[in-house]
Amino acid sequence: MSFFSKLKERFTKKEDKAVYLNGFEKSKQTFSDALNQMSYSFHGVDDDFLEQLTIVLLESDVGIELADLICERLKKKCDEFPDVTFHWAMNFLLEIMENIYNEVPDQPIVYNENGPTVILLEGVNGSGKTTTAAKLAHMYQNEGKRVAFVAADTFRAGAIEQLAEWGERLNVPVIKGRENGDPSAAIVDGCRFAREKGADLLICDTAGRLQNKEGLMRELEKMNRVSSREIEGAPHDTWLVLDATTGQNGLNQAEVFAESTKLTGIVLTKMDGTAKGGIILAIKHKLHVPVLFIGLGEHPEDLRPFDLDSYLYSISEGLKGVE
């Protein structure tokens, strides 16, 4: 059985397969539709084929370094066989993409068994942090968890009010920072509230200003320090929220944050609005940080836990003759 057939078999058992297929429709067009065009002129995995494949990968926002690595491994794999068909070249390609993502095993989300779990959400303005906080709260509420918010993005105009509105809609208490005040002070108040009220999760919506990397580092270090004083092991998770439509620019943002704090996961928003699905592979390969959640639509339930099988199948579902 081919790799694609096994992938399809696993995918058909997923509960959220329709959400994935809809969410990755644009990425599928960039990736599998472009590869289908290459099938008509396929004469083997030669230099011309690899050059065309590199272009497809770059247009999917894999990035030049990773595109070269994928092509190098594909060439090496295909050299083992005298007459590789397009069918097998595509199966090898998908298998290589899976292997690259899995080279560094994903670490599971850490939940505090002895009190509230503190999650810091980081990211630049416009990445979708506040909306992501609301979607995460909705998800955890459906699991029976008690959630509280900290509005610690004290520098963006309207950020505190925006999270407060979500808190009212979701019936989630919001501990508010003071506008233009110290975000760490809000986190201290939030940790104390969560501990006293028995919250399961404290989701902290923080500021993310990249104009001054040194200032950002000091700010994030202080947030880590004050939360750990209030709740042992906090922050238990630090997730970076990235706008998937920014592609490689988002990866550059991620590198800055990874230098400034210990990231434990990535949340990619607006995945349904981009054809650049390859950014998922690029992030994992470059940062060795797992993509935990992806936004595949506007509704709260469209924030889905990332699943590698569903991702690979959704972007390659349109490939012809590869089963």
Image (spheres, rainbow, N blue to C red):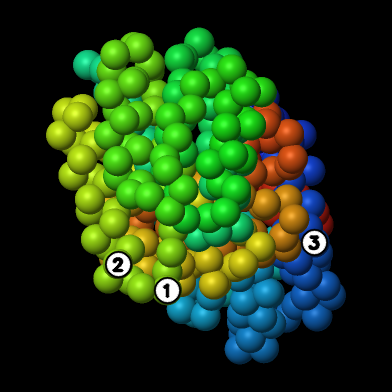
* In this view, 62 is above or below 201: below
Q: Could you tell me which secondary element the residue under label 3 belongs to?
A: helix
Q: Residue at x 79, y 43 (%)?
A: 22
Q: Residue at x 60, y 68 (%)?
A: 247
**Vertically, is 151 above or below 253?**
above
Circles 1, 2 touching at the beta carbon (< 8 Å) = yes
Residue 227 percent coordinates (x, y)? 24, 37
Residue shown at 64% from the left, 44% from the top = 295
Amino acid type of the residue that numbered disc 2 sits on in the rendered structure: Gly
Q: Which residue is mark 2?
A: 215
Which of the two discs, 1 and 3, sits closer to the camera? Answer: 1
Q: In 3D space, how far apart are the residues under numbered discs 1 and 2 (Cα atoms)?
A: 9 Å
- Which labelled disc corresponds to residue 211? 1
| Contact (Cβ within 8 Å) of mark 1 with mark 3 | no
For disc 2, the neighbor class at 10 Å (few under 14, some 14 to 19, many from 20) is: few
User: Is residue 31 left or right of 305 when viewed as pictured?
Assistant: right
Q: Nearer the viewer, residue 282 or 128?
A: 128
Q: Position of residue 30 (x, y in %)?
A: 75, 66
Q: For marks 1 and 3, give the CA distance.
A: 35 Å
